[in-house]
Amino acid sequence: MSFADSLGEAGRKRGRLYAYGACLCGCISEVMLDISAIIILYIQMLGGNDMVMMSINSFTGLVNMFLFIPCVAVIARIGLKPSVRIACFTGTAGYLLMAFAPFFGAYKCHAAVAGCFIYCLQRALYGACWYPLLDAFLRPEDRGKFFGTLRFLYYSFTGILFYLIGIAMGKNPPEWLMQVVIGLTGLCLLGRNFCISRFPEDRETKRETPEIRKALRISICNGPLTAYSVYGCLLMVASTSLGPVTYIYLREYVKMDPGTVQKISAIGMAGHICGFLLYNKLLKFFGMKKLEIAVHLSYMITALLMFILDNRLPGYGVMVSIILCVICFTGSVFGCNNSGEMLALARPGNKTMATAFVQTYFSFGGFIGRGSVTLLLGATLLEPVWQFCGMEVSRYQSIFLFSGVIAAVVMLLIPTLPSVVPKHHDYYEPYR
């Protein structure tokens, strides 16, 4: 009997509820830095230039690539919950430093950027703890519904909250209001620590080896885990920029007005939410194997459609909205698949390293995907316009073409996925 089975339904439900609470307390700070414009506007107020504002968006990817695996050694020595406590207090300190940055005078912008970096430092430590903690009360058959519900709450809550914050800020928000919002966001991370401190914790996970080389060797020698990590990294390279490039393309080349682009982005958000709501039913009906193949085909087809779709066609805005909705829906399913497969592939006694190993690869893929697109656009390495079958093609459409081609090539790795060939000598415990 697994530890999750021994808890009984009441114990597992209690763990899930605290996990939802931890998600809601921590998601505000994540979305504020990753997606919202609040931090960028705040840095602008403090005198930051474009390069400074771009740099803060790259902190998380850079930190995660290098710190996920070393964080496993820290977790193995001090424990999962103490590591979460350190992460939450560090994140709070980072946000409070941002909030108090104006008091640093001539160094206020530097203080705000330092606060961003301090916050990003703890994300690898927290991320390496999260999945092993969840595994204590999640059975394989619970994962689909849990991750779908968790991410639905994440996007719905932050979407509503940041919409209300936007109304409160108005066109020209005062500096003190930005400080209050950022400071309160940092304090919310203490609520994440409160919820996680009440998680049931598997004693076997506590006894995992602190020998990082041995734990890493076990993960590398786990064929399904390594194959899934490499596959996910490459698919992230192909897919991670589809949404952002679409918005830039519509605004800069198609010349849609900001209001229309915002409406289309809202349709994309609806795609995300629908994906999370329907994920558990899709998983039960199709199974992991068919879902992973469908995700891959969806990314490839939507990228190629964005390449060949002529913006002069009647109803172009509607067609792009549908494609973007599918891209976002696919992203939701991909994210939930990834969470479930990480837990399914994490060998008992090596769960922390296994999940950190996978997340390192995915972080690397996301960084390469977005970084390469930033380089291509920023350095103007692509032809602004070229002809394809009598159609005028922009440099943004060239990026869609590259994404589609990369996704097509990566399809060669699908037979290596554990869900496609589930019988292995190595550990794999999927939803059945």
Image (cartoon, rainbow, N blue to C red):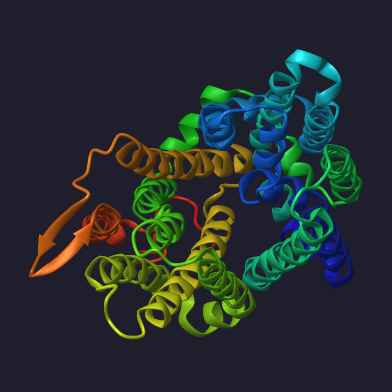
Residue 361, image quadrant: top left
Residue 279, position as x, y percentages in the image = 58, 76
Q: Is residue 136 placed above or below 369 in the rendered structure?
A: below
Question: Count of labels shown?
Answer: 0
Residue situated furthest front in the rendering:
172
Which residue does the image show at 56% across and 68% down from the upper left? 259
Which residue does the image show at 44% across and 50% down from the upper left? 426
Q: Is residue 174 left or right of residue 150?
A: right
Residue 311, position as x, y percentages in the image = 29, 73
| Nearer to me, 173 or 11 | 173
Question: Quadrant of the image for the C terminus?
Answer: bottom right
Residue 6 visible: yes
| Nearer to me, 183 or 316 | 316
Q: Is residue 171 placed above or below 266 in the rendered structure?
A: above
| Nearer to me, 342 or 1 | 342
Question: Quadrant of the image for the N terminus?
Answer: bottom right
Residue 51, position as x, y percentages in the image = 51, 28
Q: Is residue 214 left or right of residue 184?
A: left
Residue 378, image quadrant: top left
